[in-house]
Amino acid sequence: MRFLTWYDYRTRFGIVGRLLDKIAFRPLIGWATAWSFDRLRLHIDEGLDPKSTFRLAAIHLSSRLAVAFIWLWQGMVPKLLLNHVDERAMLTASHLPIGLLPLIGTFEIAIAAAAIITWRSPWFFLFNILAMLAALANVAAVSPSFLFAAFSPVTLNLGMIALSITGYFASVQLPTASRCLRQPPKGTM
């Protein structure tokens, strides 16, 4: 089955309105329409209620953005911007040079970027679970006193694991605008 939709309207506010329409409004309206049709496809093909797919998409979005933000914050603020004493203490306890702190911070920022770049991949969440378990095991082995600190790695890592489990299960059948043809095939119009 093929649905063809298009929007034909005139913008207000002269050249500024036309520019905003071209770079923001038309692409957003086209994306939202394609995304909605994919929700309809999931309803027809898989029997998934459109409200449920909307909720799964919202759960996936919030899980993915939260995990990305935490990686970004942990890489940028305590490691790159503040060079925090606790970060230096954990490196020292791990017998690693303190000079690695900026590299580790940059790596964590790269993981935050990967969380966004791999948006449709549920495998990122599995990677994150393994990374959090490894980080928690490392802290337990080399700096166990941090496990009982006010802002403990236990709560941070277990929270990240819970977000990842939630995101993983929500990402199974997500609607996506990329499944829809955004332009009619050549020769059909």
Image (tube, grey):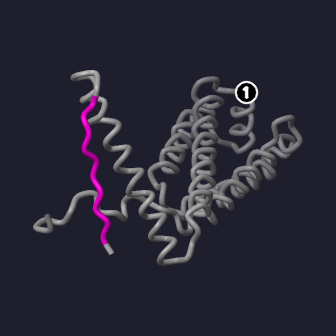
Question: Which quarter of the rendered picture does the N terminus lie within?
Answer: bottom left
Task: Indicate left or right for 39 with 9 as reference.
Answer: right
Q: Is residue 158 above or below residue 93?
A: below
Q: Is residue 28 magenta?
A: no
Amino acid at circle 1: Val
Q: Residue at x 38, y 43 (%)?
A: 28
Reading the image, the residue beneath label 1 is 85
Helix, strand or loop at disc 1?
A: helix
Which quadrant is the C terminus positioned in?
A: bottom left
For the stretch drawn in magenta, the main secondary structure is: loop
Q: What residue is at 57 percent from the left and 50 percent from the top?
A: 61
Residue at image point 61% right, 63% down:
52
Residue 160 versus residue 186: which sits nearer the camera? 186
Other-residue count near label 1 (Cα within 10 Å), few / some / many at <14 / 14–19 / ≥20: few
Q: Position of residue 188 (x, y in %)?
A: 14, 68
- Which residue is at a point 51% across and 71% down the rendered structure image? 43
Q: Establish if 152 lies above or below 170.
A: above
Q: Residue furthest left?
A: 187
List the single residue furthest toward the front.
9
Of 81 and 61, which appears nearest the observer?
61
In this view of the protein, can residue 126 be seen by the observer? no
Instruction: Give residue 15's position: percent from left, percent from top.
Output: 22, 23
Q: Nearer the viewer, residue 177 or 145?
A: 177
State the image quarter where residue 186 is shown.
bottom left
Identify which residue, 101 or 70, lies in the foreground: 70
Along the horizontal axis of the image, is 130 left or right of 159?
left
Q: Say above or below: 55 vs 84.
A: below
Residue 65 location (% of width, % of height): 58, 45
Which residues are the magenta region?
A: 2-11
Total marks shown come to: 1
Up-down: is 180 above or below 88? below
